[in-house]
Amino acid sequence: MKTLSQNRCFGGTQGVYTHSSDATGTQMTFGLFQPEVATGAVLWFLSGLTCTHENAMNKAGLQAWAAEAGVALVFPDTSPRGENVPDDDAFDMGQGAGFYVDATEGAWAAQFQMESYITKDLPEIVFAAFDLDDTRQAITGHSMGGHGALTLALKEPTRFRSVSAFAPICNPSTSDWGTPQLTAYTGKPAAHDATLLVRGGATLPPCLIDTGTADQFYDKLGTAAFATALIDTKSEATVNLRRGYDHSYFFVSTFAPDHMAFHAEHLA
Amino acid sequence: MKTLSQNRCFGGTQGVYTHSSDATGTQMTFGLFQPEVATGAVLWFLSGLTCTHENAMNKAGLQAWAAEAGVALVFPDTSPRGENVPDDDAFDMGQGAGFYVDATEGAWAAQFQMESYITKDLPEIVFAAFDLDDTRQAITGHSMGGHGALTLALKEPTRFRSVSAFAPICNPSTSDWGTPQLTAYTGKPAAHDATLLVRGGATLPPCLIDTGTADQFYDKLGTAAFATALIDTKSEATVNLRRGYDHSYFFVSTFAPDHMAFHAEHLA
C-alpha cells in the first residue's frame, strides 16, 4: 500500500492510498478518513456512477460529522481502472460503473470483481494497515453505491451493524440503471437486486434511506418496490422522502449528518 | 440574469446563475446559496487561483453552517473567461487568476476588472434579483480570494461588517504570488497589498485569519507581515495558526464553521 496524499481535516487525517488488488488485478485507489479521537468504528461509503474515490470525499461533507462521532470513513473507487481494463462508451457501464458485483461474463470477468474487492480485498488491506475495529462496521452509499451498500449488507448479514443509502438504486432488475449492467456483468440481475434479496429472506441490518422527491432519476430507483418489501417483511427501516431534493451531492451533504448519527448509534 | 441550476441544499437553495457583466464585458457565472430561514445577511466567498464559482460551493461545506445562521452565500468566479479573453500559460496569471483588481495594463485592461465586478457589478445584480440586505454584508476568501477579501474590505471600509480569510495571500507585493500578477495587471502591486493598506491607515473591519502550519505555500502568504501590521495598528483581529493543516479545501472546510460563526455574530 502506498500513500498518495494526507490532508489534515477536522482534526483527523484524510488520506488517499493505492494498492495492488488481488480481486481486480489492478491498482486500486481509496480514501480513508481517520478521526482524531477514534472509536475504531468504520463507515464504508460506496459512490455512484462515474465517481472515483474522490467525489464523496470532497463533496459529501461527512468528515465533519465523522470527526464528532469518532468514526473512520472509507471511500473506495467504483470500478477497476486503467488502459488494460475493459470499458464502454456509456457512462453507466464499465469503468466508473462496477455495480459492486463480481462479473462472470465476457471481458468483464477478469477484473470487474468489485464485490470481492469491497468484501474481502479492501477490508484485509484496511484492517491490517489502520487501527480499526472490524467488529464495528457500517455501510452507506449514493445511487449505484446505495445499491452496493444495500446488496452487500444483505449478502454479508453479520458484517455491518447498520446500512443506509442516499437515493439508492434498490430494484435494479426492473430498471435501466441495473438490468443492462448486471446482465452484462453477471447474467443474473435478480441475484443483485436489494428488493428481491429482502423478499427472498435475506437479513437486513437496521436501515435508513433518504431519497429526494425532485430526484431527476426518481423513476430509475425503485424506491416504492423496496419500501414495500421492507414493509411486507417487517424489516427495521426508515425511508425518508425529502421534498424538493435532487440526486446531487447538495442532497447527500444535507442528510449526511442524519446518516452519520444513525450509524454512530448502531456502532456505539 | 439566467438560472443555470438550482439544487435544494440544507433546506435552502444552491443556485448557479449567469449574467452579462458591464465590468468585464463577458458572461460571468456565480453561485448563490439562499438559506430556508433567511436573515437577509450575505457572506461573499472569494476563491483562489485556478478556481471557478464551483470549488468552494462544492467543497467548503459552508452551506451547512450558513443554513443554521440564516446567511446567504455568494460564490463569484475568479476572473473573466472565454475564447476572446486574454490568458496565460501559467496557472497564476490570466483566466482563473484575476486577483480581484481592475487591470489598467496592456491586453488585461479591457476585461480583467474584477474589483469593479465584485464591488459594483455583481452586488447590483445580486441585490436586485434576490431578497438580501445590503446593509448586512461580510466577506471571506481562500488564498488569492483571501487577498481579495482583505483588500476589498480595506478599500470599501463601510460595506462589510466583518472580514475573514483562509490562508490568505496578505503581503503580495513581496511574493511571487502577487508581485508578477499585480504588476502585469496594474503596474502597482503595493496599491493592492493588504499589509501595506493596513499600514497606510485603511480601516479594517473585525478580522479573522486561519492559516495552516503545513501549508505548502506558507512562505508565499506573508502572514507574519500582515499579523505585525495588525498588531502595530491595534486592529481588531484574530490570527489562528493551525497545526498540521495545509492549503486544501480539507483545511477550509474544517474551519468553515468558525468563520461562519464569526461573521454571523457581526451580521446579527
Image (cartoon, coloured by chain):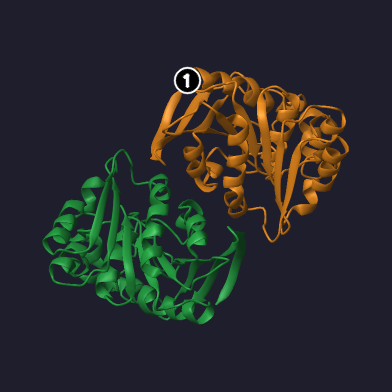
Chain colours: A green, B orange
Q: Chain of mark 1?
A: B
A21 vs A96: above or below: below
- In the rendered image, the quadrant that contains the C terminus of chain B is top right
Q: Is residue A93 visible?
A: no
**Which residue does the numbered mark 1 point to in the structure image?**
B129
* Along the line of sight, the residue nearer the viewer: A178 or B111: A178
* Along the line of sight, the residue nearer the viewer: B240 or A27: B240
Is B163 on the left or on the right of A224, as rendered? right
Query: What residue is at 78 percent from the left and 34 percent from the top?
Result: B182
Near mark 1 (Cα within 10 A), the count class, few <14, some 14-19 or many ≥20, is few
**x then y, percent, for residue B142:** 65, 43
Query: What residue is at 80 percent from the left and 52 percent from the top?
Result: B219
Query: What residue is at 50 percent from the left and 45 percent from the top?
Result: B58
Q: Is residue A22 visible?
A: yes
**x then y, percent, for residue A196:** 15, 65
The picture quadrant where one finds residue B15 is top left
Is B24 on the left or on the right of B225, as rendered? left
**x then y, percent, for residue A207:** 27, 62
